[in-house]
Image (spheres, rainbow, N blue to C red):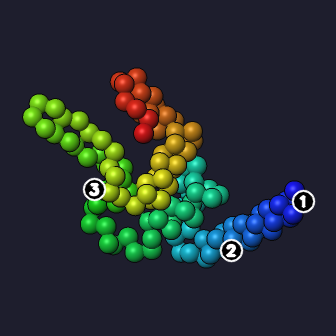
Amino acid sequence: MLALVRQLEVVREQIAAYDKEINRLFQQHSDSRIFASLPGAAGRLAPRLLAEWGADRERYENAAVVQALAGTSPVLFQSGKYRFARQRKSCVKPFRRAMHLFAFQSIRQVSWAREYYDTKRSQGQNPS
């Protein structure tokens, strides 16, 4: 049992070293202040968002491209009279997760985001 504890301690130290290096690289990036200023993104989420968005945002033609890439735009399925929207499966999963985390952090930090979320929930929409 003690051998396992020692191994886990080494892993914990390695993770702390990675976190420190990620933070150092994030602080050096020219856009770090932008991402750090996002509501609820300070700390671990801001570097993750920066990494997912990338440095060359000229590659995104418009918001729809980003939504499709991040999996935040629904896909409409239709067959005869049957029609519904479902979550996009073909996307960059880590990007989708980062955007969902940011959205839920925004709900906690920004009043208009909370109001919008509550309104949509009262209309019967799911939180995903």
Q: Is residue 87 above or below residue 29?
A: above
Q: Is residue 61 above or below residue 43?
A: below
Q: CA distance from mark 3 to mark 2?
A: 33 Å
User: Which picture quadrant has residue 123?
Assistant: top left
Residue 64: numbered disc? 3
Q: Secondary structure at mark 2?
A: helix
Q: 86 and 52: which one is in front? A: 86
User: Which picture quadrant has residue 59?
Assistant: bottom left
Residue behind mark 2: 21
Where does residue 9 sit, x and y in percent of width and height? Answer: 82, 63
Residue 62: numbered disc? none
Residue behind mark 1: 2
**Residue at figure coordinates x 58%, y 57% from the top left:** 45
Where does residue 12 sit, x and y in percent of width and height? Answer: 77, 63
Q: 7 and 90: which one is in front? A: 7
Position of 19 with respect to 10 (left or right) is left
Position of 9 with respect to 32 (left or right) is right
Asked if residue 122 can be seen in this view, the reply is: yes
> Nearer the viewer's eye, disc 1 or disc 3?
1
Q: Is residue 96 above or below residue 24?
A: above
Where does residue 128 sit, x and y in percent of width and height? Answer: 42, 39
